Amino acid sequence: MKKNLMSVIILALVLVNLVLTAILTFTIVPQTKKSNALIDQVCSAINLELESGEDQNTPAVPIEDIEAYKIESSFTVNLQPGEDGAKHYAVFSVSLSMNTQSDGYKDYKGAEGLSAKETIIQSEINTIVSNYTLEDFNANGYQSVKDDILAAMQEMFGSKDFIVGVNFSSVTTE
């Protein structure tokens, strides 16, 4: 008799649990949908991308189609004063990754074309890096600096598929 009564109590508790789960599901799912819609509206209002962290501006280029152009002189750039108010600087070497299959590569004749424009490239890189503070420069493995330089180089050469990467071979900050 006790086993039968215990089975009835367990069955009743399972049914109550099922009913409460259904109620929770039907009350939470619509609120979640409304929250997602609100987040989408806010992101579109402030122009945020909702994709993954991958850079959508640069096409994927196989490694055999990439040629690196190393800017011979290293850069020494004064950084913006940070929270500590002290003067900081960065010393680094830069190389640009070029897509050898790009029309821009043929137009600028590869590394020879870039060497003729090296002072313009250096000036642009100096201008971009000098806008960073020490903390911003070092954040995330220098990725934001590289992304800004890449965007400027792509704009300078008028093509997103010619310059496909910016690389720092050595970096020292103080």
Image: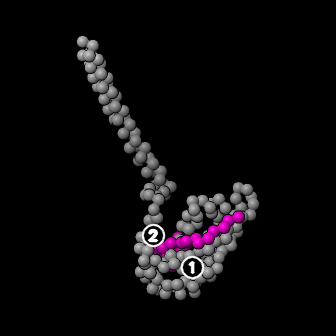
Is tag 1's residue or tag 2's residue first in the polypeptide sequence?
2
Q: What is the C-alpha distance between the residues marked 1 and 2?
A: 20 Å
Towards the viewer: 162 or 32: 162
Let me know if residue 145 appears in the view.
yes
The residue singled out by tag 2 in the image is: 58
Image: magenta residue range:
151-174
Asked if residue 63 is among those painted magenta in the image, a careful observer would answer no
Q: Is residue 67 left or right of residue 81?
A: left
> What is the x, y in percent for residue 38?
44, 47
Which labelled disc corresponds to residue 83?
A: none
Let me know if residue 158 appears in the view.
no
Q: How many marks?
A: 2
> What is the x, y in percent for residue 168?
58, 71
> What is the x, y in percent for residue 166?
54, 72
Which corner quadrant holds the C terminus?
bottom right
Point 57% across, 59% down: residue:
140
The amino acid marked with disc number 2 is Thr
Q: Are marks 1 and 2 in contact (CB under 8 Å)?
A: no
The amino acid marked with disc number 1 is Lys
> What is the x, y in percent for residue 155?
52, 74
The residue singled out by tag 1 in the image is: 70
- Name above or below for residue 2 compared with residue 61: above
Point 50% across, 72% down: residue:
165
Towards the viewer: 18 or 32: 18
Towards the viewer: 42 or 100: 100
